[in-house]
């Protein structure tokens, strides 16, 4: 019985320590990501500045959309869509990931892209176009890499087919 009491005491102390550490991480100013963000938030404040803040993100996304529509590999996914809405969601998503004080209100990547039939070629083309837009706005390569490292795992939710890409789209809607 003595060992059982010791074990329960040890578990209780461990539980208190864990709950204190979770409380501390929320209370220490570390931002808690929006539920549908799909990644964690970059803690380095210089990265958001390197993107030109929210105004810079708007300019980057404007150029990004132009590139996506001009690129035959991505055009079918964006040509007939609500481009202003998509740009606004991308700005909010990138702003939150870059720790710019925004909260992404959109849907998660999996449900947003479920019916789009995005293949690896289209996904890689989108990444290339995003890099071109960031380059145009002189975002340092190191900051681009920090953001792309956060975005890269999302391919699992965005790439929905191994076959040919199609333009069957369901526009993303904020919940």
Image (cartoon, rainbow, N blue to C red):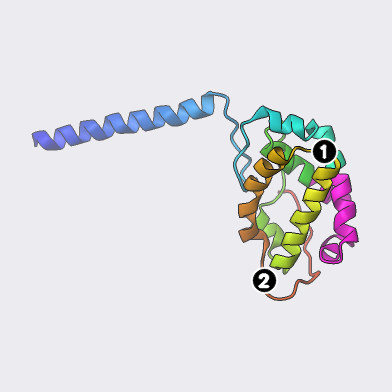
Residue 36 visible in the current orientation: no
Characterize the local packing of mark 1: few (<14), some (14-19) or many (20 or more) Cα atoms within 10 angstroms: few
Residue at left offset 61%, top offset 60%: 156
Q: Is residue 45 magenta?
A: no
Point out the residue furthest to the bottom here.
163
Q: Earlier in the sequence, mark 2 or mark 1?
A: 1
**Residue on which disc 1 sits:** 138
Give the main secondary structure, helix, strand or loop, of the magenta stretch: helix
- In which image quadrant can residue 47 be found? top right
Name the residue: 74% across, 75% down.
164
Report the number of discs: 2
Horizontally, residue 72 falls left or right of residue 20, namely right
Residue furthest to the top in view is: 28
Where disc 2 sits, the SS reads: loop
Q: Position of residue 95 (x, y in %)?
A: 73, 37
Label 1 element class: loop
- Residue 162: % across, % down: 66, 73
Q: Is residue 146 shown above or below 74?
A: above
Q: Quadrant of the N terminus?
A: top left
Q: CA distance from mark 2 to mark 1?
A: 33 Å
> Residue 98 falls in which quadrant of the image?
top right
Q: Is residue 90 above or below residue 69?
A: above
The tag on residue 161 is 2
In the visual, does 25 lie left or right of 34?
A: left
The residues colored magenta run: 61-89
Q: Nearer the viewer, residue 134 or 75?
A: 134
């Amino acid at each position: 019985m003595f060992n059982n009491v010791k074990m329960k005491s040890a578990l209780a102390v461990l539980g208190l320590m864990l709950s204190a550490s979770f409380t501390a991480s929320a209370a220490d100013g570390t931002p808690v990501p929006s539920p549908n963000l799909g990644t964690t938030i970059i803690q380095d404040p210089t990265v958001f500045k390197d993107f030109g803040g929210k105004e810079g993100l708007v300019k980057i996304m404007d150029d990004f959309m132009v590139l996506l529509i001009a690129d035959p590999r991505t055009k079918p996914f964006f040509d007939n869509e609500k481009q202003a809405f998509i740009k606004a969601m991308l700005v909010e998503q990138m702003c939150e990931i870059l720790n710019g004080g925004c909260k992404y209100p959109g849907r998660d990547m999996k449900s947003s892209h479920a019916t789009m039939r995005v293949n690896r070629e289209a996904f890689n083309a989108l990444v290339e176009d995003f890099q071109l837009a960031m380059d145009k706005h002189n975002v340092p390569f190191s900051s681009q890499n920090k953001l792309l490292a956060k975005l890269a795992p999302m391919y699992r939710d965005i790439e929905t087919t191994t076959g040919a890409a199609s333009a069957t789209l369901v526009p993303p809607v904020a919940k």
